[in-house]
Image (cartoon, rainbow, N blue to C red):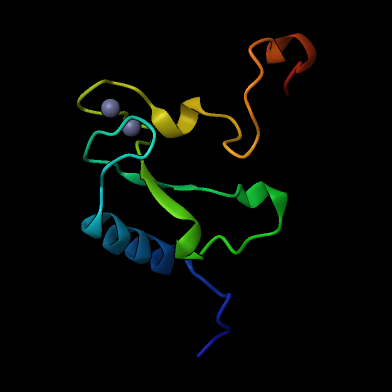
Amino acid sequence: MGKRTDLTEYGYRKARARFLGDNDVCHLCGHPQADTVDHVVPVSKGTVDPSDQDNWLPAHGVNGCPTCGRKCNGEKSDRAAPRLTNSRDWYAGP
Ligand SMILES: [Zn+2]
Ligand SMILES: [Zn+2]
């Protein structure tokens, strides 16, 4: 039972594994073996359902890319907004 939007951690991991089983080519560096999903529209914006796979793209997570070594999903900030090269000047961060 449960609501449609009620995605458990287990359910999310299963869906993610299935998603990456179909396509594990990282959309950020173009290499295979992505181990996490990147949300095209950031979930933090609050406008998207985190479980909506239309909003998912494969990306390398904390383990990084075995081919180029990048931690793609951790590197990028907000894909929807152009990255400012001097963003550190005004973003003090937590
Ligand atoms: Zn990558
Ligand atoms: Zn790579």
Q: How many marks?
A: 0
In front of the other: 34 or 84: 84
Q: Position of residue 52 (x, y in %)?
A: 51, 65
Q: Quadrant of residue 68?
A: top left
Q: Position of residue 45 (x, y in %)?
A: 71, 49
Q: Residue at x 72, y 21 (%)?
A: 93
Q: Residue furthest front?
A: 82
Please say if 1 is above or below 35.
Answer: below
Q: Residue at x 25, y 47 (%)?
A: 24
Please say if 49 is above or below 68.
Answer: below
Q: Residue at x 33, y 29 (%)?
A: 29
Q: Quadrant of the C terminus?
A: top right
Query: Quarter for ligand 2?
Result: top left
Q: Residue at x 47, y 62 (%)?
A: 54
Q: Quadrant of residue 50?
A: bottom right
Q: Position of residue 66 (x, y in %)?
A: 21, 27
Q: Position of residue 9 (x, y in %)?
A: 46, 62
Please say if 85 is above or below 34.
Answer: above
78 left or right, relative to 51: right
Q: Residue furthest right?
A: 90
52 left or right, relative to 65: right
